[in-house]
């Protein structure tokens, strides 16, 4: 469930529930009432709270989420100061009958990670937006992370951390077709594209 929570800048949070009733909450932030409405109506058992990176606009409601789901582990990159469980690159979490894989994708921040749910949905935080990419603290590193994402199955749906694009989500195949930052053949060209970023 993609939640348009507003927040600092058109943020998204996510509640991903398994048919068995277990769920994960991703990047709890923004409008607390939107989050609470989702929690109450879905009535899931949130097993994990996943944090794509430690920037404040993605963890604004972490304290409330932990209060709502006291048994949930807060998971993410080992460099993320908010996590209680440090995930390794490639580590897989079981969620009911499904799974979520951790992919380290530094570049926007050192602790950036994406989460791949059941090989079908990729939650990208500020690494990849629809039509854009996140601010690159280290362009070469972000370029490598984007190349890693680009190699995934094209049928995967991309779910970003902010509503910056023309659509709120789309398939990776379609994103590769329209996102000029995702198609740069070299790191140097990627850096040149970043200079022209709106």
Image (cartoon, rainbow, N blue to C red):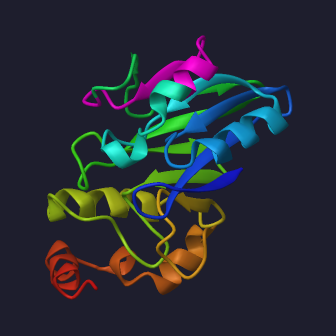
Residue 75 among those drawn in magenta: yes
Residue beneath the point at 47% across and 23% down? 74
Q: Quadrant of residue 32?
A: top right
Residue 181 higher or lower than 33, as above or below: below
Instruction: Tell me what residue is drawn at x 78 percent, y 28 percent.
Output: 44
Outermost residue, top side: 71
Give the image location of residue 67, x and y in percent.
Answer: 56, 18
**Closer to the camera in the image, 132 or 57:** 57
Q: Is residue 118 visible?
A: no
Q: Position of residue 25 (x, y in %)?
A: 60, 35
Q: Is residue 127 left or right of 117 when viewed as pictured? A: left
Left or right: where 142 falls relative to 26:
left
Q: Locate the C terminus and report the quarter of the image it occupies.
A: bottom left
The foreground one among 88 and 56 is 56
57 magenta-colored = no
The magenta stretch is: 65-80
User: How many numbered circles does the render carry?
Assistant: 0
Which x, y percent locates residue 50? 50, 33
10 on left or right of 39: left
Q: Nearer the viewer, residue 117 or 90?
A: 117
Vertical arrangement, residue 8 with respect to residue 34, above or below: below
Q: Is residue 45 left or right of residue 144?
A: right
Instruction: Name the residue located 34 percent from the left edge and 26 percent from the top edge.
Output: 82
Image position, residue 37 (x, y; %): 74, 42
Q: What residue is shown at x 19% (from left), y 82% (from top)? A: 189
Q: Is any part of residue 23 visible from this angle?
A: yes
């Amino acid at each position: 469930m993609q939640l348009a929570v507003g927040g600092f800048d058109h943020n998204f949070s996510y509640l991903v529930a398994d048919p068995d009733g277990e769920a994960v909450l991703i990047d709890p932030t923004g409008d607390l009432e939107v989050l609470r409405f989702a929690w109450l109506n879905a009535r899931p058992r949130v097993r994990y709270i996943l944090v794509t990176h430690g920037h404040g606009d993605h963890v604004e409601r972490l304290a409330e989420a932990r209060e709502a789901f006291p048994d949930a582990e807060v998971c993410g990159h080992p460099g993320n100061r908010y996590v209680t469980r440090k995930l390794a690159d490639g580590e897989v979490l079981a969620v009911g009958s499904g799974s979520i894989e951790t992919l380290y994708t530094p570049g926007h921040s050192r602790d950036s990670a994406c989460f791949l749910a059941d090989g079908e949905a990729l939650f990208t935080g500020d690494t990849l937006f629809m039509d854009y990419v996140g601010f690159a603290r280290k362009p070469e590193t972000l370029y490598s992370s984007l190349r890693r994402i680009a190699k995934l199955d094209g049928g995967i749906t991309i779910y970003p951390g902010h509503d910056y694009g023309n659509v709120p989500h789309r398939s990776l195949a379609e994103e590769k077709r329209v996102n000029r930052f995702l198609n740069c053949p070299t790191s140097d060209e990627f850096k040149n594209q970043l200079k022209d970023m709106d």
